[in-house]
Image (spheres, rainbow, N blue to C red):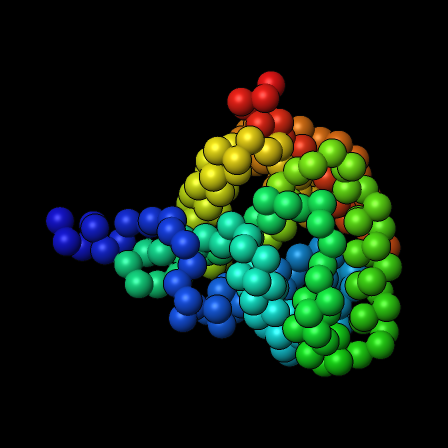
Amino acid sequence: MSVATENQLKARDLDRGDNLAAARVFTAAFMDDPIWQATGPRRAWHRRLVLTALYYAEVLIARGRRAVLLGAYRGERLDGVIIVFPDGERGLPWWGWVLRSVAIIIAGPRATARSLTVSNALDRLHPEQAHAHFWLIGSRPDSLGAGYLLMRSATARIDRLGRPGYLEATSPEMAEVKELLGWRVRERYTLPTGAVVTTMWRDCPSRV
């Protein structure tokens, strides 16, 4: 019985001491993501370094902006992380760029220019209606169910706030999973590599 309890996945607020662990989870999850394949450094070691620095900054930004920041824990092991900004339509504060500057310097000018081009294009697709931005969700490759648990837990919190949700799915498989969870397709953006990012929307049940 104790073994089953220890191995059970549970979602809770990310522990204060798990900022770096969360960055590493995101890095492992997004190393081969279509957006980073199109924009990030070409060498794997370089991309890993950039992503770790970037996602560490993203976790700190999430804490500073009081985002919904949840971890999926299997015992004491962090298996997945989600970041949702309830005030998703608000822009990045100036100090957020300071935190991101380390990753920008490590990435170099070419990768940074490619990333900004794609980021600006995706920003233009954001809806004008007030919404919660489901910004990042990632899990360990060997952790079954962590992503699903985090999506359900974060969605429940956002629903209690009475806000619809918005996200970008970076693969057809991810978009299909989100559709099963009640999301619908809004628009599609084609990356320079030909891969497609799907923007998606979910109405708040209390306001439908």
- For the residue pair 194 and 147, the one nearer the viewer reads as 147
Q: Is 148 on the left or on the right of 207, as rendered?
A: left
Q: Is 148 on the left or on the right of 202, as rendered?
A: left
Residue 44 image offset from top left, x and y in percent = 66, 74
Residue furthest to the top in view is 208
* Residue at 74 percent of width and 34 percent of height: 129
Residue 69 image offset from top left, x and y in percent = 49, 54
Residue 88 image offset from top left, x and y in percent = 67, 46
Instruction: Determine whether 132 is above or below 73 in the image.
Output: above
Confirm whether residue 142 shows in the render. Answer: no
Residue 168 image offset from top left, x and y in percent = 69, 44
Residue furthest to the left in view is 1
* Residue at 41 percent of width and 54 percent of height: 13
Confirm whether residue 189 shows in the render. Answer: yes
Among the 4 quarters of the image, the one containing residue 125? top right
Image quadrant in which the C terminus is located? top right
* Residue at 59 percent of width and 21 percent of height: 207
Number of marks in the rendered image: 0
